């Protein structure tokens, strides 16, 4: 690393910066949204989404083993682990509220998308100053999601139909899934390049 601040950032967020862990999630979200866009309604067969969930879980296991085998493992202290799960629970509840708002209120903005943008900005590691290459990617992704989430306000609720997408929610989740994959790949590249050569060889 080139500075003490970079070293501190890497050590505090070591496991979080394993970018490829996000790829199965993003890929699963994108493919599930794509399926929802092309499936015939009413839905009679849920085989494909079940396969997608299983495939994403298996890929997640493979990626996790890759990181542990190649770079080792840093276990968080119990207090931080508890805070992590509390935060995830809060995000989950907010997700339910956002989904309800999108389905019920029918407003020209997408709350699921705004929630994803907030998650990128506020979840660990947060986007704070001074920016580094990890937080720059996360900031750009958040801004892109916000813009996509509010486009119906400017172009109308049905503008996604021009792109062949049924609903705003499907369009936003497809977009978010693709960005999650992109961020994951970039973070993995940044993570590997941030490690000292000697440390990478030892592990």
Image (spheres, helix red, strand yellow):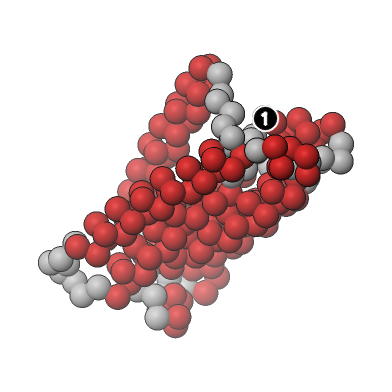
Q: Which residue is mark 1?
A: 12
Image position, residue 146 (x, y; %): 58, 57
Of residues 155 and 26, the one nearer the viewer is 26
User: Element under label 1?
Assistant: helix
Is residue 108 among what the camera can see? no
- Are there few (<14), some (14-19), or many (20+) residues within 10 Å of tag 1? some
Is residue 140 among what the camera can see? yes
From this view, report whether residue 19 is shown above or below residue 91: below
* Quadrant of image for the N terminus: top right
Of residues 47 and 98, the one nearer the viewer is 47
Q: Is residue 50 left or right of residue 106?
A: left
Image position, residue 29 (x, y; %): 40, 58
* Quadrant of image for the C terminus: top right
Q: Residue at x 70, y 37 (%)?
A: 202
Of residues 66 and 153, the one nearer the viewer is 66
From this view, report whether residue 28 is shown above or below residue 63: below
Q: Residue at x 76, y 30 (%)?
A: 8
Q: Looking at the rendering, which quadrant does residue 194 occupy?
A: top right
Q: Looking at the rendering, which quadrant does residue 161 occupy?
A: bottom left
Q: Residue at x 69, y 48 (%)?
A: 192
Q: Is residue 20 left or right of residue 140?
A: left
């Amino acid at each position: 690393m080139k500075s003490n601040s970079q070293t501190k950032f890497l050590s505090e967020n070591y496991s979080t910066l394993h970018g490829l862990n996000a790829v199965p999630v993003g890929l699963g979200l994108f493919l599930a949204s794509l399926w929802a866009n092309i499936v015939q309604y009413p839905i009679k067969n849920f085989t494909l989404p079940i396969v997608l969930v299983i495939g994403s879980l298996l890929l997640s296991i493979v990626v996790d083993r890759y990181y542990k085998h190649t770079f080792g493992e840093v276990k968080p202290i119990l207090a931080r682990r508890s805070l992590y799960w509390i935060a995830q629970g809060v995000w989950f509840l907010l997700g339910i509220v956002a989904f309800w708002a999108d389905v019920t209120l029918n407003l020209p903005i997408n709350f699921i998308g705004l929630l994803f943008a907030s998650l990128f900005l506020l979840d660990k590691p947060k986007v704070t100053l001074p920016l580094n290459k990890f937080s720059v990617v996360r900031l750009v992704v958040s801004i892109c999601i916000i813009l996509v989430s509010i486009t119906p306000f400017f172009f109308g609720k049905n503008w996604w139909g021009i792109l062949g997408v049924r609903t705003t929610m499907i369009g936003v989740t497809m977009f978010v899934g693709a960005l999650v994959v992109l961020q994951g790949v970039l973070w993995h590249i940044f993570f590997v390049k941030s490690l000292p050569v000697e440390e990478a060889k030892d592990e």
